[in-house]
Image (cartoon, rainbow, N blue to C red):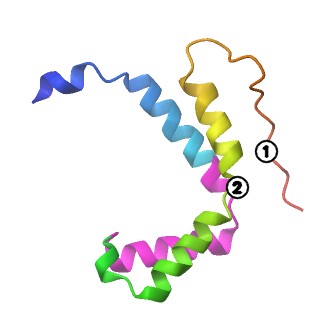
Amino acid sequence: MLKRFKSVPWLLVLLSVRVIYEHWQRADEADRRRAVEILRTSKGLPHKMTRDERHELVEIAKRIDHVALGRDLAATASPMPVPGLKTKPPKKAA
């Protein structure tokens, strides 16, 4: 079983987690708190969430900038710079 994990590029995994964390931190504080509250009470299991809670999580996920997240993950995963792929600095909260 452990032989399968030897080929995983752990640095790439850690860098990807860092990018996802940075994007999570850009989300609204109230959205982050509510998402964590729902996931803790349901232990992350969809069948333990109400229909409204699942809908609320989907709405929170929709507010994350998926294009920027995908661009940043692609830049992280690519071994060489991708032509035309530019990462933008995070938007400053007003």
Quadrant containing the N terminus in the rendered view: top left
Furthest-front residue in view?
A: 84
Mark number for residue 26?
2
Residue type marked 1 = Pro
Residue type marked 2 = Arg
- How far from the left and from the top, in percent, is residue 93? 84, 59
Left or right: 41 in relation to 36: left
Vertical comparison of 69 with 24: above or below: above
Mark number for residue 90?
1
Chain part drawn in magenta: 23-44
Vertical comparison of 56 with 1: above or below: below
Vertical comparison of 71 with 60: above or below: above
Question: SS class of the residue under badge 1?
Answer: loop
Query: Residue visible at 59% across and 39% down?
Result: 19
Query: Residue visible at 64% across and 44% down?
Result: 69
32 is within the stretch colored magenta: yes
- How far from the left and from the top, in percent, is residue 58? 54, 71
Task: Using a 10 Å C-alpha cutoff, classify the residue at mark 1 as few (fewer than 14 neighbours), some (14 to 19) or many (20 or more).
Answer: few
Front-lying residue, 31 or 50? 50
Furthest-right residue in view?
A: 94
Kindly indicate whether the residue at mark 2 contacts the one at mark 1 (C-beta within 8 angstroms).
yes
- How far from the left and from the top, in percent, is residue 50? 40, 88
Front-lying residue, 30 or 44? 44
